[in-house]
Amino acid sequence: MIAIMSRLQNMVFVVLFMTIMGLLAWLSNRYPYEFDLTWGNRNSLTETSVRLVQQLDKPVKVTAFARDDNKSIRDLIEKIIGRYQRHKSDMKVEYLNPDLVPQLVSEHGITVDGELLVQYGKRQETTQNISEKSITQLLMRLSTETSRYVAFIQGHGERDLLGTANHDFGTFGQQLNNKGFNLQPLILATTQGIADNIQVLVIASPRTGYLPGELKLIAQYVDKGSNLLLMVDPDTGESLEPLLAALDIQRLPGVVVDATTRLLGISNPTFALAIDYPRHPVTESLHSQTIFPRASGLIAAEESDWRATSFIQTLPKSWTETDALLSGQQNITFDPETEEHAGPINIGYALERPIENIDDGKTVSQTQRIIVMGDSDFLSNSYIGNGQNQDLGTAILQWLSHNDAQIDIGIVSAPDAQLQITPPGALALLLVFIILLPLTLLGMGVVIWLKRRRR
């Protein structure tokens, strides 16, 4: 009887134990709870990112263009996006093999395996940097409701940001629309002034000159502290010289040629490359080359009211050619006895100066931003897909529209990420774990074996 009761108790215990374990498993699946035991909670989102995610009232869709065999990238994406999904359940991730969806890759300008397309509401943006800082900043930009108006001057043969011709900027304009920019063509001859809500004015290499009245409107726009993107080519007329002079920028004579391009199989020497970029917010995300067909060299005045920063430079084996190409010669060489300048050649300048404006009777201090490029072909429909041309163009517009604010994510660096051992410490570890401990275990084994043998 006692044996039966004991067995019954054991069976009841097993049944209850299995039932409790099953309930706990069900509860953990239905109500998951995670906690981070790492130093500084470095495997969790920071408070800044959590607050931003909790303010998003629309679903977020992330499309990861990552190949099936690139497991490391997919694991990294799942790890980083998973941190956001813990705080936003309607944030979904879809993985696409870029080799199987070439139309989507071309439509969204995907160039890197593992690139992310993030969509929030009607806005979308891509990023190649899979990190909390990059994704949080991207979500901040997508959730900003303020419209950014970009006006581009038309009527003088300028490149059209909505055009489909090879020399136009239609592909680039579509990308800007996707990122929340509102593009507006502007004909100076039909306006009395440039509207105050225009955040960036684009002048894209006019083929015919501007009238004095039109130049006056542009000068008034610049004088009041507004932002400008000015692109000139070697064949751009001289009507923009007064504007360049006001910006303390001089255009060098000739066309930039680059001997390095022959090593890459480019036969046209007027294609210039930029690979190493001076430090600037515009070039912060660039990690590969950009290509500039038929560029003009630029030089900034040493003394100026503008703070000029060169952010695009050609390679050392480049120079400004003033004669050989025009006369049809085949062998092109640098001639120091002429007006030619040896590389590296500056073809992109970022200008800044403080501006004080009156807003509702109050003086508001701002920073005016202007970018002068010695080439406009790099953003045309024909060449925007080369290298990181598109990324450069996007970064330029983001910077000009003051949309480059870096959120202080405050990601904590673990103090124990690296183990540094001094030479005496390394010797001690060698003696203890490589010599002393194995000999001790061996000695203990021999002693135990001898004792058992004597029995």
Image (cartoon, rainbow, N blue to C red):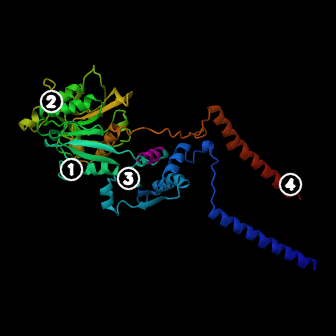
Mark 4 residue crowding within 10 angstroms, few (<14) / some (14–19) / many (20+): few
* Outermost residue to the top: 303
How far across and down, in percent of the image, does residue 409 sit?
51, 40
The disc placed on residue 253 is 2
The span shown in magenta is: 133-141
**Dot 4 corresponds to which residue?**
451
Q: How far apart are marks 2 and 4 (CA)?
A: 97 Å
For the residue pair 366 and 160, the one nearer the viewer reads as 366
For the residue pair 44 and 69, the one nearer the viewer reads as 44
Residue at x-position 85% and y-position 57%: 452
Label 2: which secondary element: loop
How far across and down, in percent of the image, does residue 121 sit?
41, 55
Disc nearer the start of the sequence (2/3): 3
Residue at x-position 32% and y-position 53%: 109
In the image, what residue type sits under mark 1? Ser
Label 1: which secondary element: loop
Left or right position of 51 against 247: right
Q: Can residue 251 be seen in this snapshot?
A: no
Disc nearer the start of the sequence (4/1): 1
**Dot 3 corresponds to which residue?**
124
